[in-house]
Amino acid sequence: MIDRQLLRDEPERVRDALAARNMEGVDIDRVLDVYDEWRSLKAEGDTLRHERNEVSQQIGQLKQEGKDEEAQAAIDRSGELKTELRELEARADELEAELDEALMELPNLPHESVPVGADEADNEEVRRVGFDDRRELPDEVTPHYDLGEELDIIDEGRAAKTTGSGFYFLKGEGAMLEHALVQFMLDVHREQEYVDLFPPIPVKTTSMEGTGQLPKFAEDAYRIGGSETEDYEDDDLWLCPTAEVPVTNMYRDEILLKDDLPLKHQAYTPNFRREAGEHGTETRGIVRVHQFNKVELVNFVEPDESYDRLDALVDEAAEVLDRLGLPYRVLSLCTGDLTFASAKTYDLEVWAPGTESEDSPDDLGGRWLEVSSASNFEDFQARRAGLRYRPERHESAEYLHTLNASGTAVGRVMVALLEYYQNEDGTVDVPEPLQPYMGGREVIEGHEPVGEAAVGAGKKD
């Protein structure tokens, strides 16, 4: 969350940030009124406690001096002060809860370098990579969902029977490719000095709040044992929407040392999202689904190093695409397209040439697929999760900065591979760096489908 002192000292900065993010209906004046009343009550409480301490000291002295009536008056006053203080503290607690609730609803403030814009159309392209020496493609590139069905490596229909729409089976070489990508990505990032984690998949409400998924995006999350829209408790569990949540909260309410930083963790997890807020998105294929795999990179750094680390983080995620030879671009997201918790974000978008889109690279066709968002959250998540570090052992603890990026989204990278590396005969070349992870396979040739349906469709003799 944002610093409450910053809100009080620079309310116009907060208003400008909300306007840049296209957030309407936030009553900053009301939040400031609550904050001022809370501070006033805290000061009044300090005064009452001081008076109560003085009265308590007087009681013993007055009794020793035999001044019983004055001692009784002091005792009566002490009781009055206790009642006043109890009532005042109860009201202060109510106001602080209201203040915290309001602050939890406020997004992070965009960094001054973030381009101002309304939505994704105003994002700024930073660079393109891999287009000058791109490989020769078939005259017509088959979309991954058709190709996956023809090769019998992606099966959405049977997943709909077992689980529902928005899920899929990977089969044979498709499953092998998924495993290969995960292990390849982990190996790349180990070279970049990331320490592996294998986190738990269910996460508490407090963890979701710590990274900013709750309360803002409850409708997109899978809650265990209840509807995501019903009231929830701190200890309720949710299916992990991204490894950012458990990994960031791993050091919750702890104080790290300067010598610990920068701390770099990577974690592979399956991730679960309802995508309830997405309308008009594609229903075929594995681009936007409810369960997907991802390798996540999470960084904990000193504040004055976080923007240098953000630039390095972009390069670390991009190395996966560089080694696989996939063309991509880097975007700087505008204020209107930033995520709730981010102060600055760069998106990596890989080129998938199999499906036409209005937003395609020049006259090449295809579409862009986001495979990583590299974000600096500054101290926004650290304040929510109590993540601090001690600059020197004798100094007070300060909030550190957190960053993360997908390193990368496995399913979408697979889509790009199936479309970019496909051949005229419908097979798919395996990029050289992945071949050792695929048992030496150089080409994905697919499988014979099984069942009577395959015979009826003419796919099997």
Image (cartoon, rainbow, N blue to C red):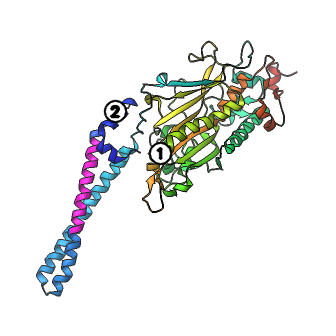
Q: Rounded to the nearest whole Å, what is the CA distance between mark 1 and mark 2?
A: 24 Å
Circle 1 crowding by C-alpha within 10 Å: few under 14, some 14–19, many from 20 = few
In this view, the residue farthest toward the right is 461
Residue 304 is tagged as 1
Q: On the rendered image, what quadrant is the C terminus found in?
A: top right
| Residue underneath mark 2 | 16
Residue 273 seen in render: no
The main secondary structure of the magenta stretch is: helix
Q: Quadrant of residue 50?
A: bottom left
The relative height of residue 326 versus residue 245 in the rendered view (above or below) is above
Q: In which quadrant is the N terminus drawn?
A: top left
Task: Specify whether residue 148 is in view.
Answer: yes
Q: Position of residue 43 (x, y in %)?
A: 24, 58
Q: Is residue 39 within the magenta segment? A: yes
Q: Is residue 251 above or below residue 350?
A: below
In which image quadrant can residue 19 be found? top left
Residue 379 circle label: none
* Residue range (magenta): 30-50
Q: Residue 185, position in %: x, y?
A: 69, 39
Residue at the image position 51 percent from the left and 51 percent from the top: 236
Label 1 residue SS: helix
